[in-house]
Image (tube, rainbow, N blue to C red):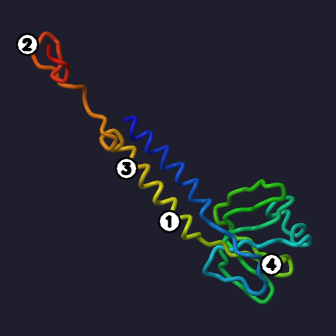
Amino acid sequence: MLRFRKLGGFLATFALLLQGCYESLPLQQGVAPMDQQVEFVLSDAGRVALAPKLGAAVEKVRGNITAVDGESYTMTVTQVLQYGGASATWNGEKVVVLKGHTVGFQVRQLDKTRSTLLAGVVIVGIVALFFGKSLLGAGSDPVTASGTGGQSLTGSLH
């Protein structure tokens, strides 16, 4: 039972570390892609205009674009990032962001190198968790022979 608790803790830690395997590409201009997760960096005017919907001091809005027209993006918001580092997770609520309310966007993508290294560490950790003692050669106590007065077979003979 203790092993399963350790495994659960290990997997929860893995899930948190996996979030660190994403990277934001440099700020871009133009039309944002619809097939990737996007972070819109808001302008001062955008921050003021979207404050009733997103909250105060919002720096970036993260999510997936569901529609684009000449003036705006409609997106399902997954996270709102504020100045000072605070953030709030959203459940895909739709928000319309005017193109004029952004200074650009950043595409978020999975960093394959870090993800592969993390997966390797997780596999080694799981193997060590389940097979650690046998891999290290930690076996049972030496066998004692019956009728030898408690001397082990590995003891010295007189």
Left or right: where 48 falls relative to 41: right
Q: Amino acid type of disc 2?
A: Gly
In the displayed orientation, state which residue is furthest to the left: 147
Label 4 – label 3 distance at C-alpha: 45 Å
Q: Amino acid type of disc 1?
A: Thr
Q: Quadrant of the C terminus?
A: top left
- Within the image, what quadrant is residue 109 found in? bottom right
Q: Closest to the observer: 74 or 58?
A: 58
Secondary structure, mark 3, is helix
Q: Residues within 10 Å of mark 4 (few under 14, many from 20)?
A: some
Mark with earlier residue (4, 2): 4
Label 1 – label 2 distance at C-alpha: 57 Å
- The residue indicated by pointer 2 is 147
Mark with earlier residue (3, 2): 3
- The residue indicated by pointer 1 is 116
Mark with earlier residue (1, 3): 1
Q: Is residue 121 above or below residue 103?
A: above
Q: Quadrant of the N terminus?
A: top left
Secondary structure, mark 1, is helix
Q: Closest to the observer: 58 or 9?
A: 9
Residue at 80%, 64% in the rendered image: 53
Whether the residues at callouts 4 and 1 have beta carbons within 8 Å, the answer is no
- Within the image, what quadrant is residue 155 found in? top left
Q: Disc number at residue 37?
A: none
